[in-house]
Amino acid sequence: MTPSQNPDKNDKNDEEQAGKKVPYHFGEKLRQVREHRGYTLKVVAQRAGVSESLVSQIERNHVSPAIDTLLALADVLDINLEYLFEEYRKKRPVHIIRAESRASVKEDEVVYEELARPESPTGEESTESYIIKIPAGSHTHHGSFGHIGREIGLVLKGRAKFTYAGQEYILEEGDSVSFSSGSPHVLENDGDTTMEAVWFVTPAERFAK
């Protein structure tokens, strides 16, 4: 047993879970590997620094083991953690917004079409994105006074004049820009045809609802 292992403490932590619902069922896999390797409950318990009764309860899914106990058992049995957790991988959904179903909002003649909705309506890590369409001679208003967050933009079509904190920058097709949203900023069509840009804002403001 290593100095950091404490069987009594581990057993107490795990046994406190015995009366609760067991969310993760590792027992069957642990038992199958143990039997395949020819180890007894006693051998595994001694090498992992826990009690034999605790290993038995874990194998029968009566107790959900503390993470240090699970790691110790996996080490003794030489089990890859991917194997233990493979059915518990979180399913991460793919969100698709069809072109004809985009939420949009207008500022005078400027159109914002939503490309992605934030996972949650609030939070520092939330992000939203738009295709911005600006007719010749028009400009955005939303950032005129600044707001919290950061933005990244990419000009898809046309030519833009980007004004940030009083400084002007010309953006040609394919140019990108990133900046803190805290200073006043305006995107203006500097050409003769409709300008389009893709824009990312974090945290999400849910400008288009």
Image (cartoon, helix red, strand yellow):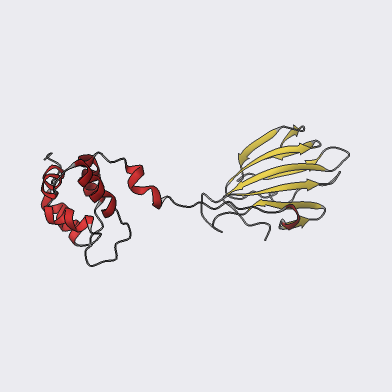
* Residue furthest right in the image: 192
Q: For this view, does 66 lie left or right of residue 145?
A: left
The C terminus, quarter of image: bottom right
Instruction: Tell me: 159 left or right of 116.
Output: right
For residue 109, side relative to residue 198 (left or right) = right
Count numbered badges in the picture: 0
Can you say which quadrant of the picture contains the N terminus? top left
Residue 25, position as x, y percentages in the image: 31, 56
Is 135 or 113 nearer to us in this picture?
Answer: 113
> Is residue 186 among the parts visible in the rendering?
yes
Q: Residue at (81%, 37%) from the top-left corner?
A: 158
Of residues 90 and 38, the one nearer the viewer is 38
Please say if 163 is above or below 87. above
Residue 139 shows in this picture: no
Q: Where in the figure is residue 30, as x and y percent of width and height? A: 25, 49
Question: Residue 67 appears at what percent x and percent y?
Answer: 26, 49
Residue in the image at 21% along x and 64% along y: 18
Position in image of residue 83 (x %, y %) = 34, 44
127 or 102, which lies in front?
102
- The residue depicted at 62 percent of the width and 45 percent of the height is 181
